[in-house]
């Protein structure tokens, strides 16, 4: 008789075979009842709907949503294809979000299909599907983005609601800016007799400075006998930013987010009232708070470190306890990497205080900080050498977050734009807040993004005479909630106010 471990191994082998065939969505019919129950009870699969499962990790804690969010779009694609075949696509509004590279997990994904029953299907973690019996665009106006069937940009712009323009202005403007002429939109407007929509889109294009497209829409519709009245659907003027016609929508959206978040930051972050100290004095003060800075920053990332361990590791003297050798060894390597990165950051700060552009220094040096963070773990054989190669080469997900960072290909487009924005920004306060927020929003590395973002934040603080600021571990939940609000709802105010409060907290040496 096979042992329980041997039986589980048999079930895992079948699961691996399904996964090797692209099995992120697993139907109950793909597993026998015995294998299914065995995998369920051992935490290797999880039921999303009756008869529908996703692979999971058995070490996931109760309430851990990351596995679901990581599987979300693949699950929806597989489930919807099974239900509706090719007779479905997501709503025009959510289509525009995906075209703009916003893959935030929605609370409710709206599906258009002639086969739909106008039903809500509950999913995990308060997410759901709403299938609506609605007409779909023609086949040539349906595209697939990461296996999700979406309206094409012209079809989505014609079909989307007025409210979407003001709820998600960065998304709409970024996709509008990706269009170079009006012929496809005009074809849809003329076929449907959409005179009101034509006026709305003419106003939207004029809002972003595309007067020729706006004029073409008005002239063509009027020549066809329609009474078209131009109306700007945006409640606010276009931010002062020149849209490039050849930019990827994700780049345009990043620039628009930067511009739209500037005003709330300037209204909620205190202006600098500190004087920039002499170089040696500044570096000494930062060195004096190193142990507390490392303790809080590493603890926020889940490492188990103590001030004593950090002190020993910074001096190259450490010997993990035999009872917790594996865990403490990794924690000590992380602490050593943090110390090495901290020395590199101090060198970057020296360049800035000597007059170099903060954004340029950050662009040139952030790769050094990253390599120093993980060099000890690579040398020790905990991580592969390729870990130091640079920006991530795979999709990454943030624990408990509905925000899905950009694809690895998009990261390489976004990072030069991010640093250009940082270099060109005249406000210290905006550089401080958006330097941190947008770095973790893009998430360019597989690991270490939070630590590097906090280094970057402190470099930008120094440029305005602000003190080096520690984000305390006891405020971890508030910190992550503020980042989530900025990432998902585009509301930067809570994060701005949080950083301002941290600056004068008891964990910050300089008041």
Image (cartoon, rainbow, N blue to C red):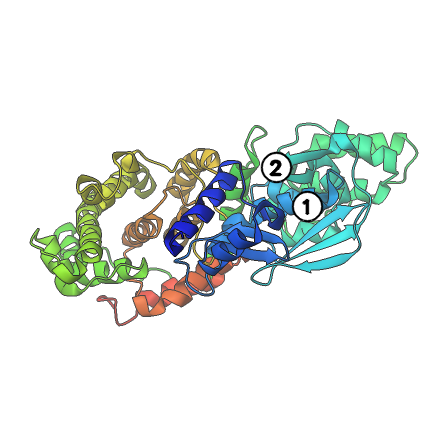
Say whether marks 1 and 2 touch (CB < 8 Å). no
Vertically, is 86 above or below 402? above
Mark carried by residue 145: 2
Furthest residue toward front: 1
Vertically, is 26 above or below 412? below
Q: Position of residue 106 (x, y in %)?
A: 60, 54
Q: Is residue 501 left or right of residue 347?
A: right
Name the residue nearer the viewer: 147 or 224: 147
Badge 2 density bin: few <14, some 14–19, many ≥20, Cα 10 Å: few
Name the residue nearer the viewer: 192 or 285: 192
Name the residue nearer the viewer: 266 or 333: 333
- What residue is disc 1 on? 80
Which residue is rendered at x = 68% and y = 46% of the image?
A: 80
Name the image quarter holding the C terminus: bottom left
Between the C-alphas of marks 1 and 2, the distance is 14 Å
Which residue is rendered at x = 37% and y = 53% of the image?
A: 5
- Disc number lying in front (1 or 2): 1
Asked which secondary structure carries label 1, the reply is helix
Q: Is residue 110 left or right of residue 333?
A: right
Q: Position of residue 324 (x, y in %)?
A: 18, 60
Residue 288 appears in the rendering: no
Q: Position of residue 164 (x, y in %)?
A: 69, 51
Vertically, is 275 above or below 238? below
Asked which secondary structure carries label 2, the reply is strand
Name the residue nearer the viewer: 458 or 337: 337
Q: Is residue 130 left or right of residue 24?
A: right
């Amino acid at each position: 008789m096979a042992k329980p471990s041997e039986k589980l191994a048999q079930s895992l082998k079948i699961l691996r075979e399904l996964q090797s065939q692209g099995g992120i969505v697993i139907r109950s019919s793909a597993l026998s009842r015995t294998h299914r129950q065995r995998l369920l009870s051992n935490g290797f699969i999880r039921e999303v709907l009756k008869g529908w499962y996703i692979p999971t990790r058995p070490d996931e804690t109760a309430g851990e949503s990351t596995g679901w969010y990581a599987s979300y779009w693949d699950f929806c694609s597989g489930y919807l294809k099974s239900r509706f075949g090719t007779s479905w696509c997501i709503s025009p509004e959510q289509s525009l979000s995906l075209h703009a590279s916003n893959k935030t997990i929605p609370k409710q994904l709206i599906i258009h299909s002639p086969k739909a029953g106008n039903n809500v299907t509950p999913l995990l973690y308060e997410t759901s599907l709403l299938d609506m019996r609605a007409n779909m665009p023609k086949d040539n106006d349906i595209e697939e983005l990461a296996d999700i069937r979406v309206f094409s940009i012209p079809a989505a712009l014609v079909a989307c609601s007025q409210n979407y323009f003001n709820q998600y202005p960065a998304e709409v403007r970024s996709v509008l800016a990706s269009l170079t002429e009006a012929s496809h939109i005009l074809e849809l407007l003329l076929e449907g007799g959409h005179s009101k929509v034509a006026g709305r889109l003419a106003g939207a294009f004029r809002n972003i400075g595309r007067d020729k497209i706006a004029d073409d829409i008005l002239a063509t519709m009027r020549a066809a006998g329609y009474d078209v009245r131009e109306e700007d659907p945006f409640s606010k003027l276009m931010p002062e930013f020149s849209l490039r016609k050849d930019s990827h929508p994700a780049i345009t959206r990043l620039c628009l987010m930067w511009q739209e978040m500037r005003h709330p930051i300037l209204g909620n972050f205190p202006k600098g009232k500190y004087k920039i100290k002499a170089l040696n004095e500044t570096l000494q003060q930062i060195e004096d708070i190193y142990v507390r800075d490392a303790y809080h920053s590493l603890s926020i990332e889940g490492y188990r470190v103590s001030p004593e361990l950090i002190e020993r590791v910074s001096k190259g003297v450490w010997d993990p306890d035999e009872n917790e050798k594996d865990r403490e060894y990794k924690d000590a390597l992380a602490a050593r990497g943090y110390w090495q990165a901290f020395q590199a950051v101090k060198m970057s700060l020296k360049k800035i205080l000597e007059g170099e552009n903060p954004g340029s220094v950050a662009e040139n040096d952030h790769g050094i900080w990253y390599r120093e963070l993980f060099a000890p773990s690579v040398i020790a054989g905990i991580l592969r050498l390729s870990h130091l190669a640079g920006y991530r080469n795979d999709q990454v997900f943030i624990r408990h977050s509905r925000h899905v960072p950009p694809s690895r290909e998009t990261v390489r487009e976004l990072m030069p734009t991010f640093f250009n924005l940082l270099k060109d920004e005249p406000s210290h306060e905006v550089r401080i807040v958006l330097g941190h927020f947008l770095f973790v929003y893009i998430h360019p590395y597989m690991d270490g993004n939070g630590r590097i973002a906090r280094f970057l934040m402190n470099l930008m603080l120094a440029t305005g005479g602000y003190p080096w600021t520690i984000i305390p571990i006891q405020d971890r939940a508030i910190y992550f909630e503020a980042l989530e609000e900025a990432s998902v709802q585009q509301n930067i105010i809570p994060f701005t106010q949080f950083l301002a409060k941290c600056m004068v907290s008891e964990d910050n040496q300089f008041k």
